[in-house]
Image (cartoon, rainbow, N blue to C red):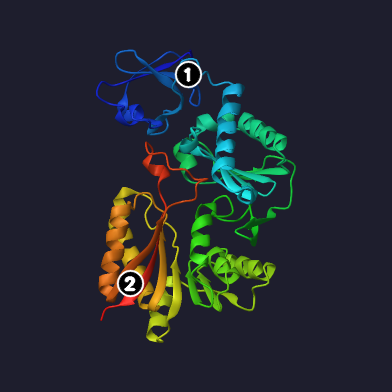
Amino acid sequence: MYQATVRIKKGTGRSLKGGGMWIYDNEIDTISGTFENGDIVNIEDFDGYFLGYGFINTNSTITVRILARKKENMITREFLNERLLQAWNYRKTVMEQADLNCCRIVFGEADFLPGIVIDKFADVLVVESLALGIDRLKPVILEELSSILASDGYPVRGIYERSDAKVRLQEGMERFKGYLSDPFDPRVEIVENGVHYIVNVEDGQKTGFFLDQKYNRRALGKLCAGKEVLDCFTHTGSFALNAGLAGASSVLGVDASMTAVKQATENAALNGLQDRVRFECHDVFELLPSLISQGKQYDVVVLDPPAFTKSRNSIKNAVKGYREINTRGLRLVKNGGYLATCSCSHFMDPETFSKTIHEAARGAHKRLRQVEFRTQACDHPILWADEASYYLKFYIFQVVDEK
């Protein structure tokens, strides 16, 4: 047992008892014993019943994050090794071997290691640590994971940290990015779905590349042979390149970031697709009305925007944004063509998102025939007790004019 004990109030902790990983500050009755923020503490119900071990941080509204629920599972190096081994074995089971070249190995709470994300890009690991307690355990976690991977034939060449998100400030931590190993070239080549990419782990968004759409890109690709494709919010060109590799006759990818456009153009050349896949820098909200006014239409339109809402308070504005781009995107799809559209915000729940798309279709005078509904790739598992782990909603529709 640890030196400090957190006891929750009677009638609270329903999420925790249902399998959740967090205890909020307003659920805590007492904290007894001595501790420093980031320490492991005992967790008890209002009547003293043992509920688990977790790390504490009174700077955060999420005051305790659970690591273990059984009294015998003290948080040791061996315990962390077992958690990491379970996470890696899960990926090996649910993914094809080729997909292990680039995948998310640790997905925070969904892998029962709250507050930390670890992505594998070829032989490089990129870590994002967002909670004080897990940050203290980070050196051991990375040592153990590197050992596990090496023993399985996947030696780690280098480790880079991308803990530069603002949420670190809410934990009383400084934002940080930099090497946790000997320096290496931050431009790393990966292969996903047969497509080659250069991932910049130092300056790319998040950890450098969005791995969660891996199988959604593949699903879209099979619809693109011989088609003319528009990929909006293309980032590093992933949907566009999957379409090109699948045989699309022409692909235009657009993004507001010139840095992303340059990287996507380089990726097209890396795959020998520069003749059929091109990228331009545009504000999508300005471009779509312009294309509509020109009478332009495509066989396939992809809408993969950034999260329009990062809090419950901004959902109303987010709905307006999603409705606007989907209405305009639908008007750009040829009769019988296809729309792929998604939301990556967990605050935009599936019901609200589907309702928004329905309203967009009505506004565009289109009928939708659903081809597929998908979520994030299986290396980003959804823990049903943790609603934040379910964030990506991805639809493919056939679009038919109202007649």
User: How far separated are the C-alphas under marks 1 and 2?
Assistant: 54 Å
Give the x, y percent position of residue 286.
41, 75
Q: Residue at x 48, y 69 (%)?
A: 223
Q: Can residue 30 be seen in this view?
A: yes
For the residue carrying disc 1, how many other residues have a C-alpha within 10 Å: few (<14), some (14-19), or many (20+)? some
Of discs 1 and 2, which sits in the foreground? 2
Residue 170 versus residue 7 in the image, above or below: below
Horizontal side, residue 171 vs residue 275: left or right = left
Q: Which residue is the site of mark 2?
A: 327
Q: Which residue is drawn at 27% across and 78% down?
A: 402
Identity, as a three-letter code, of the amino acid under mark 2: Thr
Which residue is nearer to you in this view: 239 or 313? 239
Q: Which residue is drawn at 58% across and 32% down?
A: 84
The furthest residue to the bottom: 294
| Mark 1 or 2, nearer chain start | 1
Residue 151 figure quarter = top right
Quadrant containing the C terminus is: bottom left
Give the x, y percent position of residue 227.
50, 77
Q: Is residue 128 visible?
A: no
Which structural element holds mark 1?
A: loop
Give the x, y percent position of residue 155.
73, 40
Q: Which residue is the site of mark 1?
A: 35
Identity, as a three-letter code, of the amino acid under mark 1: Phe
Which structural element holds mark 2?
A: helix
Give the x, y percent position of residue 129.
54, 39
Q: Residue at x 59, y 49 (%)?
A: 96
Horizontal side, residue 392 vs residue 164: left or right = left
Residue 277 versus residue 82 in the image, above or below: below
